[in-house]
Image (spheres, rainbow, N blue to C red):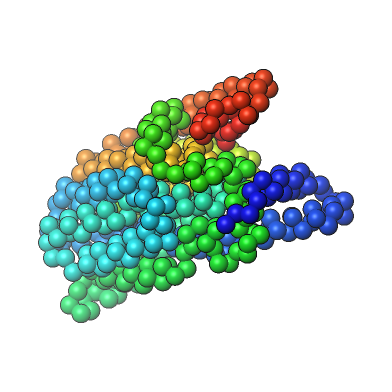
Amino acid sequence: MEKDPSKHSRESSEFEKTADVDDASELSFEDRERAALDRRVWWKLDLCILPVVTMFYFLSWLDRTNLGNARVAGLQKDLHLTNAQYSMALTVTFIPYILSEIPSNLLLKIVGPNLLLPALLTLWGVVTTVQGVVKSYSGLLACRFFLGLLEGGVLPGLVLYLSFFYPRDRLQFRISVFFSSSSLAGAFSGLLATAIMHLDGKGGRPAWAWIFITEGLFTIGFGLVSFFILPRSPAHAAFLNSREKDYVVATLRQGGAIGKDDKTDSFSWIEVGRTFRLPQVWLLCCVYFLNGTVLYSLAYFIPSIVQGLGYAPTRTQLMTVGPYATAFVLTNVASFIADRYRCRGLVTIFSSICCIVGFAMFLGSHSKAVLYGSLFLTVGGINCSSPALAAWVANNVSPHVRRATALAVLSGVTNAGGILSTWLLGSLSKAPRYVSATITLLIFSALMAIFVALTLWFLWNENKKKMVIRETTIQADEPEGLGDRSAWFEYIL
């Protein structure tokens, strides 16, 4: 239970003032104690929450995209799939994925993230494992359908879950930590697939089947363990003492990350509807669709793209590691900068420019080295943008229900872009150069930068209007329930 929110809100505010003092000796004992509390609280959360959340997304990305590795290992040949059928197997994953995102996110706080997220993880691990025993196209479609249904709530759920624990100006770097695990998953998937391919024929099963079985069994194991280690909220975190719990809640409320009381963040269909009246949500819908198309085009088809450069299957799996390892480093560096200087939009524009240059290189060159090198820019760039966009939504939509709905809707839009990607490279563009697909992705990268710039302008202009209101009125005169439309809620650019 929260003992005195106003007291701890004042403590958090006072800490911000004293944090700028360079000489620690000038701080009083109380100020130093408060500064130590601040460091200790976020360090504990980083140590106990982030590794679990990161592993969730790592396994989600690994189990969703390992179909590309299985394809190189012989799945398409053994199941006698045409390119159109392979694209359909990918598409079937996205449809239930999109449909499950909003219900899952709205249920997250009701059921409890400590129960819902581990349950989804364990069940999709079962489905991933079953993919290793399918013997027909219809069996593969069924598995991909249920995989999408169970994984749909994971990404928006994890972003929403982190917003329960971290204030707005600390959120992107934490999102980046788990988001960049997709880059690790991309790199690790290639290494793991290379090792697993040596199991070809063991137990009468081909190498591609063992990719699904081994990765799925690990997911099941971690899902069961996570039931016991994932806290429901800061108030239920056993690793925080009562003062630390109160401090986290007070800091979140002061910064607008959560409502001033439980009633503000309670479920309301009115707040769900208000989400669709926010201009920033509609602007970001365009960005998310473009981002999703580029992101999934590379995630699902980079093994095929690399193989098209003339490498053998085993060498292909290894060659996918480099671009994703680079993306991991770039994503975390860019997110640290975005949190430090509150520049989500500029980071996303930078990532778009990386993609534009990379796709232009792939389109205009015939050198194998240049073609492969371009993947470092495109994979690194598009992965760099994802945590910035997720944090941007979580930062600029409030209260809880509105934020949960926005995150789920925009994640669904991302996956709608994923549907386009499955056909763009799967059957509508010819390997190995994928010329029409590359032109499309180049244009999408440029459009993404334009829509991000428009979103930046809108949020900046709204902040100017809010500043005028704050100078001419007092907060007590403002109607309740405005959420992010409040003049005292400053949008993060």
Position of 85 compared to 7: left or right? left
Position of 447 compared to 122: left or right? right
Task: Identify which residue is drawn at 59% across, 44% down.
Answer: 253
Please say whether residue 92 is visible from this viewpoint.
yes
Task: Identify which residue is drawn at 69% across, 48% down.
Answer: 7
Q: Between residues 477 and 374, which one lies in front from this camera angle?
A: 477
Q: Between residues 56 and 484, which one lies in front from this camera angle?
A: 484
Horizontal and vertical percent position of residue 128: 27, 64
Quarter occupied by the C terminus: top right
Q: Quadrant of residue 224?
A: bottom left
Horizontal and vertical percent position of residue 410: 38, 39
Q: Quadrant of residue 315?
A: bottom left
Residue placed furthest toward the right? 25
Task: Identify which residue is drawn at 74% across, 55% down.
Answer: 34
Q: Between residues 437 and 451, which one lies in front from this camera angle?
A: 451
Horizontal and vertical percent position of residue 180: 48, 54
Q: Does residue 225 lie above or below 361 as drawn? A: below
Task: Identify which residue is drawn at 53% across, 31% down.
Answer: 480
Instruction: Count the labels in the image.
Output: 0
Please say whether residue 318 is visible from this viewpoint.
no
Position of 349 compared to 136: left or right? right
